[in-house]
């Protein structure tokens, strides 16, 4: 696992606050709602993981599949632990991914998390909506800590090979005018 983005920041003598998967103790993880809540709480960085969909979209998700702990299928049925990896995001177009809900069930690991309908967002949606929120509320910009998970046994199964994965992410970041360091 390699962190992809750490914007150039002057060295400070203070603690930086990272919203790990947003404010997942309060709202479904890795969702626009959770990221905006983390911004409201004053984080300096929003930490997130990304995966690639079948149609080469950069999707914000910790796992490369629908997590059985909190995701339900388009039919409303819970994803079963034994088959969760069959809901492989790299084998699904984004139009299929958004049909799954990953918020209504809540997460038993976070009993104070609100249960609300949520889907896995695209990276550009997160960045655009967070930036719009900070601008509308006269808040300082937030930095993004974006992690790519890539392991050789998963190449072409759960994610593309690193050169393709990184190229897709860098192209997205360039479109968003994000400064990045690899």
Image (cartoon, grey):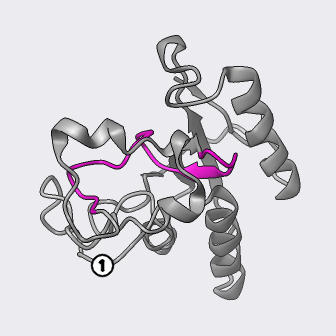
Q: With 84 as the anchor, is 5 left or right in this view?
A: right
Q: Quadrant of the C terminus?
A: top right
Q: Position of residue 180 (x, y in %)?
A: 79, 40
Q: With 76 as the anchor, is 181 left or right in this view?
A: right
How many dots with numbers?
1
Q: Does the stretch in magenta take in 67?
A: yes
Q: In the rendered view, tell whether residue 110 sits above or below residue 61.
A: below
Q: To which residue does mark 1 refer?
A: 116
Magenta segment boundaries in residue numbering: 53-72
Q: In the rendered view, tell whether residue 4 sits above or below residue 162.
A: below
Q: Position of residue 43 (x, y in %)?
A: 50, 60
Q: Quadrant of residue 4?
A: top right
Residue 139 at least partly seen: no
Q: Which residue occupies the foreground of this view, 127 or 152? A: 152
Q: Quadrant of residue 12?
A: top right
Q: With 32 as the anchor, is 139 left or right in this view?
A: right
Label 1 residue SS: loop
Does the magenta stretch mainly form a helix, a strand or a loop? loop
User: Residue at coordinates 70% horizontally, 61% vertically from top-left?
Assistant: 124
Q: Which residue occupies the foreground of this view, 116 or 133? A: 116
Residue 23 at least partly seen: yes
């Amino acid at each position: 696992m390699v962190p992809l983005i750490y914007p150039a920041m002057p060295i400070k003598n203070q603690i930086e606050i990272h919203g790990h998967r947003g404010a997942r103790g309060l709202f479904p993880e890795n969702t626009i709602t959770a990221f905006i809540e983390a911004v409201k709480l004053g984080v300096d960085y929003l930490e997130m993981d990304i995966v690639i969909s079948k149609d080469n979209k950069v999707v914000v998700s910790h796992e490369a599949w629908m997590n059985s702990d909190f995701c339900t299928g388009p039919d409303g049925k819970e994803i079963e632990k034994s088959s969760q990896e069959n809901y492989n995001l790299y084998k699904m177009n984004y139009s299929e991914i958004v049909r799954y809900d990953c918020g209504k069930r809540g997460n038993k690991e976070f009993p104070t998390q609100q249960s609300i309908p949520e889907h896995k967002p695209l990276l550009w949606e997160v960045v655009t909506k967070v930036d719009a929120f900070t601008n509308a509320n006269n808040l300082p910009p937030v930095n993004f800590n974006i992690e790519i998970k890539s392991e050789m046994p998963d190449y072409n199964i759960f994610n593309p090979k690193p050169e393709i994965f990184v190229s897709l992410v860098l192209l997205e970041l360039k479109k968003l005018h994000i400064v990045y360091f690899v």
